[in-house]
Amino acid sequence: MVAKGKKASADAVYAKKTVKSSNPFDNSAAQSSKKGQNPFDIHVNKEKFKILGRICKHDRGMPGVSRAKALQKRAQTLGQQFAVKHKTNRFKDNRIGKHLSGDQLTESVMNARYLAEKMSQVRSNQKAEKFNLNDDELLTHRGQTLEEIEQYRDERSDDEELDDERLDADFTSAAHFGGDGDSPQDRQAAIDEMIVEQKRRKNEIAKEKDEVYDLTEKLDANYKLLLPLVAKATKDEQDAKPPPDAYDKLLKEMIFEPRGSVTDKLINPDELAKQEAARLEKLENERLRRMKAEGEEDEEASILKPKHRSADDLDDGYFLAGGDDEDDGTLAYDLEGNLGTHLNGKKEEEKQDEEENGEEGEEEEEDDDSNEESDSEVDNLSDLKESESESEAEETSQVGKKKEKKSVEKFPASLDTSIPFTIKMPKTYEDFTELLSKHAAPQQATIIERIIKCNHPKLEGVNRENIVKLYSFLLQYIKDLFEDASELDIREHFQLLSKLMPHFYELTQLNPERMSNTLLEVIKEKYGEFKKNHKTYPSLETLIYFKLVANIYSTSDFRHPVVTPCFIFMQHILSRARVRTRQEISMGLFLFPVVLEFVAQSKRILPAAFNFLQGILHMSIPKRDVEQLEITPPFERDGPLSKLLALSTDKESKTLEPQQLQAADLVSQTISTDFKVRALDTTLQLIKEALNLVEEHVGSCYLAQPFLRLLSRLPLEFYPDHVHLHHKEVTELAQKLAEQKMKPLSPAERKTKALRLLEPRFEVVYDDKRRPKMSKAKEERAKLLHKIKREKKGAIREIRRDTAFVQELKLKQTLQSDKERHEKVKRIYQEASMQQGELNELARAKKKKKF
């Protein structure tokens, strides 16, 4: 009973201990103690002295844990290698060309495999098979085995009879099968006849050999008689040769003359396409750089910037580079409206010297023409040498080595045989116009092309002036054509201009600087005429010059010596000239697409162009006398000119077909109903193109809002259906742009300028260790030797531990094998004892039977 009571009380106490406490902090361990860490495993390395500033990394360690990690690492590395040592249970494909497929295996690879296999067989058993000649391999020579060559070898000499001495078919049939004759012969007669025939043949062969021998002896005797005559000619007489004549010299020159000059390697079409793509990419990057004006300030600063700055230089010469007051070579208009350039004094003096030198300097510098043209007085003009037009890659690819071939393909009229192929440059402008007036437009283009080819600057030095003269003649000819052109002549003149445009481009490429200055002088002259009466539109040839500039030069540049003045000129025309007649409206509508060509790539904005389109819409809105709409000059808010294009209640205007501007619009002054409809329709299309151009701009909403106000006031009931369609498209686009919200202003992202750091001063740290004074090189060497010694000791220690680990594995393997051997021996003894017991039992049974 007592024992049962004690057991029950013990169970009750144990049950109480197992109940979890409600206090969560009862079983919580101290925060300072690490989980699972035995304090007896920690080994503390005590220091004799504590020194301030010295960090001891090995003040305490855990040797047991480190030893266990090392053993685990060795078991995963050395243990695995020891386990698979001397094991050949893996198949490795060591054949030559094992990664090649069946189609890629060549005969050389198969031969290499065969040779490697034979060598491996020889190495496998060197003593037995190294000198083994009993090989089953068949050796061949020229397609035949050695056995065949030995079997059918014919070792007879040349003197012996080479004929086949075997019995022929006729003899065999006659002798063995009775033959086909009338009287059969007996065997003895046939054999006798055969012996006689063989003797006859041998006698004939011997006789033939004797004859050959006699002829040979006779020939040798005759040769000996001729030797004295031949010996008279000495070696010098034989070597002496007559002196070579002119024919021999020419023949040797022709023999040793090179057959052809070394040319460049033919380029693969893929490589040619890559080079063309790289060239176009380079030109596009150059155009974008010019458009954004990137790198100009950097180039000037790099020239004036000091090349070397020491560590002690605290930006003392930071502002030594040129300031903003320096004049550049950009063409621009001053405050008085005069067009000119800001050139340094040195450049102006050089220009005067060049004019004084005249043709002499040009002839001396003819060879370096391309280098001089690149360093222009006005601007780089690099876009003229490799210009990239607004059509990007298509027109750029036309500038190259195949320009002449393409021009021939484009203008088949150049093959006209009625025009002489060599034409001299006319001396005067009258002769030039007389030469062109005799032919039609295609023939005139052919004449210009042949004049350019006959007076190319590469032919003679005088041709440089002829080319410049031809360029000025062409500009004057264009002026005369369009200055007082009638309605019938305008279309024909435009066709001629389209054919002459490639020749203008070609002339500009021949001498970019001179041609650009010539065209710029003409534009300055036209601007001077416009300044005298700036309220009227210039003549038509001025607008043609703007079109010429847009087709020849790169209009996307941020600053250009020819394009920029023309851009400002067009701004002045659209902002100052009054719009009062049909001709002035047509000229403005003709000038606006030219402006779009100027800004198509750079996405710039010309305010006067947008104001002109708003003015045309304003003039198309009918207004009462009291009513006024806000409009910017040169358009009038009220009066008869404010509703010049407004339609009356005319039903004929609804039936008009869609038309473009006509040649009569550029000449006539009276405004008709069809012109009003045509002008409004053209204006709506131009507004759509302009808004699409500025769609990506931040302030496009402010450019689209004025158009909405005017478009809503147009009386569309008087216009045909195509005007309604264009009005709807423009209104939707304007509303879309007007609803766009402005982005908040933020400063441009700039790369943070790194702080200039001076060279640090290194000081030796005092570590309370006495060392002998040494130089810096010796000190570094001593440190390196100390590190090597320390690493060597560590490596020796690890090698010893690895060796001990491997010996332990060997010992375990030996003990395991001994244990297995003992178990097998014990099992054998057991089986043997059982067998002996059975034998003893049988023996006892036999003894019992005896008795």
Image: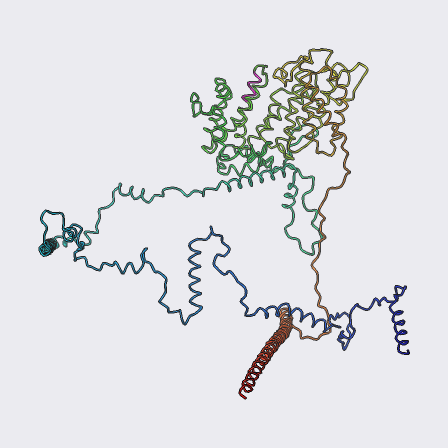
- Left or right: 348 in relation to 108: right
Report if residue 488 is visible in the image. Answer: yes
Q: Residue at x 79, y 14 (%)?
A: 624
- Give the magenta range: 489-496
Q: Nearer the viewer, residue 501 or 176?
A: 176
The majority secondary structure of the magenta stretch comes to: helix
Report if residue 228 is visible in the image. Answer: no
Q: Residue at x 50, y 61 (%)?
A: 94
Q: Quadrant of residue 508?
A: top right
Residue 114 in picture, x, y percent from top left: 42, 60
Q: Quadrant of residue 381?
A: top right
Q: Nearer the viewer, residue 662 or 316?
A: 662
Q: Quadrant of residue 732?
A: top right
Q: Nearer the viewer, residue 786 or 634?
A: 786
Residue 168 in picture, x, y percent from top left: 17, 52
Quarter of the image where the C terminus is located = bottom right
In the displayed structure, 566 sits above or below 743; it is above
- Left or right: 704 in relation to 178: right
